Image (cartoon, helix red, strand yellow):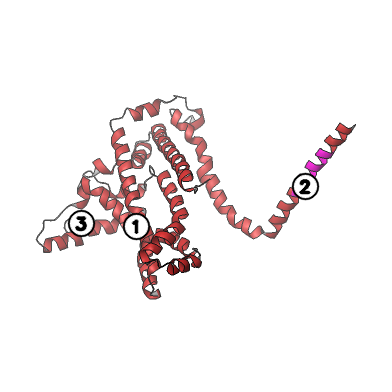
Amino acid sequence: MNLKTTISNVGKVELQNKSSIRRTISKSLRRHWQLYLLILPPIAYFVIFKYLPMANAVLAFKDYNVIKGIWGSPWVGTKHFDLFFQNPAFFTLIKNTLYISFFQLIVGFPLPILLALALNEVKSVWFKKTVQMVTYAPYFISTVVMVSIIMLFLSPRLGIVNGIAGALGFDAINFLGEPGLFRSIYVFSDVWQSMGYSAVIYLAALSGIDPSLYEAAKVDGANRFQKILNVDLPGILPAAVIILILSVGNIMAIGFEKIYLLQNPLNLSTSEIISTYVYKMGLLNANYSFATAVGLFNSLINLILLLVVNTIAKRLSNTSLW
């Protein structure tokens, strides 16, 4: 009898807990319905355009037939992965993708931090806002316009750079036709375009540092460099670690549009990366299964890198994505 009573009481408690949770959720929905309504479009976007298409990744393991559709096409296992790994272009694609990605990370990661630290030390409000506006504005230039600007500046005949070089007595250089210069052009133009925007995150982190830390550093006789080293850098470290993790997690996912638009037959040996190869094989050559396999391989590498870097960051700095 006691056992039955205990079971009954436990059941009642569980029902009460569930009822309490429902009431709390219902109350929260009624009170903050505007906020929930506001987040519905982003959630719908990710569900419709990001999560649902994941189901079609099975295309990588099939020979796609337009008539039979994705799910009716025959299974072929890892055939397309084997074809990609045995492709003579495999190592070139991996090398170009990693080279540009790491180059971009090495150059593009520290520069926004340095810009934010420098702006944080500026006393003139007018000068600080002017620099922020000048460095932030290029972020809003579209990729197509940015590529057009690069081509106009670096044109062998009409470009400003070659015009200045010619005036100084140097020969004109076909910058976009030199395979060895492509990576530098891509990376430094990207850094110029995104540095100001990225610095905003670090400026926000710097503004959240406790002012008493600066006062303590001043009392201790710390100079400007010591203050940056012992107060500013530790203050922005969590934000920097998170951005670094996300950047490494996207190592294999370089911006497709800009590289594709800057490509030409002369620089293809250093500009052909996995994303442009997937586009050409999938859409231009209509080899959908093979392109899906290559894209899936690319995403898997990104996932592994993200997990590894997140684990390392968590152990070294106690800061991570999860």
Question: Mark 3 highlights which residue?
Answer: 155
Q: Compute the Cα span from label 2 to label 1.
A: 53 Å
Q: Residues within 10 Å of mark 2 (few under 14, many from 20)?
A: few
Total of numbered circles in the picture?
3
Residue type (three-letter) at the residue carrying disc 1: Leu
Query: Dividing the picture into quarters, in which one does residue 197 lie?
Result: bottom left
Instruction: Residue lying at the far front in this picture: please name it.
Output: 220
> Which residue appears at 33% of the width and 56% of the height?
191
Q: Is residue 117 above or below residue 46?
A: below
Q: Which residues are magenta?
A: 9-20
Nearer to us: label 2 or label 1: 1
> Which residue appears at 76% of the width and 45% of the height?
17
In contact (CB < 8 Å): disc 2 and disc 1: no
Q: Earlier in the sequence, mark 3 or mark 2?
A: 2
Question: Mark 2 highlights which residue?
Answer: 19
Measured from the top left, where is residue 243 in percent x and y? 44, 51
**Residue 106 painted magenta:** no
Nearer to us: label 3 or label 1: 1
Q: Is residue 141 visible?
A: no
Q: Earlier in the sequence, mark 2 or mark 1?
A: 2
Q: Nearer the viewer, residue 80 or 215?
A: 215
Q: Nearer the viewer, residue 301 or 263?
A: 301
Residue type (three-letter) at the residue carrying disc 3: Ser
